Each structure stands twice: as structure tokens, then as C-alpha cells.
């Protein structure tokens, strides 16, 4: 297993609706929409040397997602940033931290699906953890999952919501196959993304990645494309078939958990001719 318990997180302070509490005392109401129906949106943030990578882009996506789900009284960016800051200060955190930021539709007056049962505004949860990169640069194995990523007509992937079961089912398949990660296809059989990360193919010095029809509008994904453009690296957004784009030991970059700037890009092959590319991305992103 790639992730294990980190002793530094034993006494974490988490923030639930502005209340700072020890992780063992933190409670979310059973009437909260995230418990009742996974009715929430979230972002994974990374803290580097006191600064959060692409924070405003993440907050934009959180807001777009919450608006698409018709949440009421979405907190302002300033309010959210204030709560993140209070939480980091309470934990004395500056670097090497992953923050899971969740906004739920809030507490319901009685259990049920109807959003009109939510009458007290959304709940904001800030969960920071000391967390080194999950994947190293030594190579990853993927297994192609039988679970497909849904297109917009089922559940629009542009909403970054908490219904993670398709990814979890795909990861169960990867675990059963002894692979590190699951490669998920779209309804038409083209690569959508990994179970929780975007995938980039590096072939003949050209980088390509899939359309966002069946994967989130990734902030890491956009950063990679922007860096390619800024550095004159050929890049394309296209339909990637598993036969053309992904054979054994291909140069596949993955951006995981919204992380960029350290080991967030790894190669799923051990042939290194494109190592320069990963280093370039990492170096450039670190300075941002
Ligand atoms: C399903 C899924 N794919 C990809 C990503 C990576 O996206 P980003 O780079 O914007 O964090 C995430 C991150 O939250 C995700 O949940």
C-alpha cells in the first residue's frame, strides 16, 4: 500500500464550520448532506513553503461545482482562505501538507434528498495533513479498469463532487490486479484519466492528454498544458486509444491528487528519455 498512517498527524486539529477541534473529537452531523448523499464538493490543496499551489483556481472550481449543485450561501474566497489559514496556524504547518477542503450542502432538518431540507447553509471542512507525495518517480503500474468515467449527460465531471465510488471501484480492481493505479476509459473506450489523476502521454517529444468530457477540468492538467505552451513543448488534447497511446512501458506522466511541484509527476515506465520533461515541469511549477 502506498499510503500509511503518519505519526505527525496523530494530533491534528481540523476545522468544521469554523470550529477547531482535535481529529478524534471532530464530528460531522449524521444529518449533514455529505453523510446522507455524498452531497458535497471538494478540493485537494498542496501547501509548499507557506503557499498553496493554485489556490484561487481551486477555489474557483469549488465555487463552480457548488453553484452547479445549487448550494445556498456559498462562503466567499476570503472566508474560506481565513479558515484555511486558521487551521494551518493551529497545526503549525508550512510545508509538505495536503489539505482536503470540503463544502457540503449542510445539515438537513430531517433525512432526505430534497435540498429544501437544507435550511442552515453549507458546511465547510478543512482537513490538513502532513502528507508526502503518494507516488514516487520510480514508475507506476496501471491496470485498465472495467469501470468507465461518466460523460456529462450522466454526472458532469466538471462538477468536482464527492461521489467517488467509480474511482473507488476502479482502485479496488487495481488493488486486486496488484497495480498501483487504475486507468479509466470514457464511454467510447478512450482514456479518460487515472482513478484520481490525469494522464499525459509523452511520445516523440509531444505531450498529449485526454479531453475533459469524462474527467475533471484539472488544475494540474491545465498547468501542464500551460507549461508546455510557455516552453515550446508540442502538446495536444486528443482522444487517446489504449492501443495507440498506452502500450506496455510507455512514457506516461501522471499528475496526482492535484499535486505539482515535487514528485507529483512520475513515469509509469522505467525508460528515461523523457525524464527531462518531468524535470522541466517540476522545476517550472515549483517557482509558481
Ligand atoms: C477524479 C479526479 N481526477 C483528477 C484529479 C486531479 O485534478 P487536479 O489536478 O485539478 O487536482 C482529481 C483531483 O481532485 C480528481 O478528483
Image (cartoon, rainbow, N blue to C red):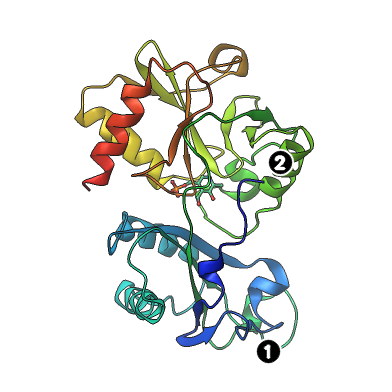
Q: Position of residue 19 (x, y in %)?
A: 48, 88
Q: Residue furthest front?
A: 7
Q: Is residue 259 left or right of residue 31?
A: left
Secondary structure under tag 2 reads helix
Secondary structure under tag 1 reads loop
**Whether the residue under disc 1 has CB within 8 Å of ligand 1:** no
Q: To which quarter of the image does residue 261 belong?
A: top left
Q: Foreground residue, 44 or 177?
A: 177
> Crowding near pointer 1: few (<14 within 10 Å), some, many (20+)?
few
Relative to 45, residue 139 above or below = above
- The residue under label 1 is 109
Q: Is residue 169 left or right of residue 57?
A: right
- The residue under label 2 is 170
Q: To which quarter of the image does residue 173 belong?
A: top right
Q: To which quarter of the image does residue 59 belong?
A: bottom left
> Crowding near pointer 2: few (<14 within 10 Å), some, many (20+)?
many
Q: Residue at x 28, y 28 (%)?
A: 228
How far apart are labels 2 and 1 at the CA level?
A: 35 Å
Relative to 158, residue 281 above or below = above
Q: Position of residue 144 (x, y in %)?
A: 69, 28
Q: Foreground residue, 122 or 183?
A: 183
Relative to 56, residue 192 above or below = above
Amino acid at each position: 500500500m502506498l499510503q500509511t498512517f503518519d505519526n505527525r498527524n496523530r494530533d491534528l486539529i481540523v476545522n468544521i464550520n469554523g470550529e477547531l477541534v482535535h481529529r478524534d473529537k471532530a464530528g460531522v452531523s449524521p444529518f449533514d448532506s455529505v453523510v446522507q448523499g455524498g452531497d458535497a464538493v471538494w478540493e485537494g490543496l498542496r501547501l509548499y513553503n507557506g503557499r498553496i499551489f493554485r489556490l484561487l483556481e481551486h477555489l474557483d472550481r469549488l465555487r463552480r461545482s457548488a453553484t452547479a449543485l445549487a448550494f445556498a450561501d456559498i462562503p466567499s474566497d476570503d472566508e474560506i482562505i481565513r479558515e484555511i489559514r486558521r487551521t494551518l496556524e493551529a497545526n503549525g504547518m508550512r510545508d509538505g501538507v495536503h489539505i482536503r477542503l470540503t463544502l457540503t450542502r449542510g445539515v438537513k432538518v430531517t433525512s432526505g434528498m430534497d435540498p429544501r431540507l437544507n435550511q442552515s447553509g453549507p458546511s465547510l471542512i478543512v482537513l490538513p495533513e502532513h502528507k508526502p507525495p503518494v507516488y514516487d518517480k520510480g514508475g507506476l503500474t496501471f491496470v485498465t479498469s472495467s469501470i468507465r468515467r461518466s460523460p456529462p449527460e450522466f454526472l458532469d465531471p466538471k462538477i468536482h463532487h464527492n461521489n467517488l465510488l467509480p474511482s473507488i471501484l476502479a482502485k479496488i480492481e487495481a488493488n486486486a490486479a496488484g497495480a498501483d493505479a487504475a486507468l479509466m476509459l470514457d464511454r467510447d473506450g478512450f482514456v479518460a484519466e487515472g482513478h484520481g489523476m490525469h494522464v499525459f502521454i509523452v511520445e516523440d517529444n509531444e505531450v498529449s492528454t485526454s479531453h475533459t468530457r469524462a474527467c475533471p477540468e484539472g488544475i494540474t492538467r491545465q498547468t501542464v498544458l500551460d507549461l508546455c505552451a510557455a516552453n515550446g513543448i508540442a502538446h495536444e488534447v486528443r482522444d487517446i486509444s489504449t492501443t495507440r497511446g498506452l502500450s506496455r512501458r510507455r512514457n506516461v506522466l501522471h499528475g496526482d491528487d492535484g499535486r505539482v511541484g515535487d514528485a507529483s509527476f512520475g513515469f509509469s515506465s522505467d525508460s528515461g528519455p523523457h525524464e527531462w520533461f518531468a524535470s522541466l515541469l517540476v522545476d517550472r511549477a515549483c517557482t509558481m
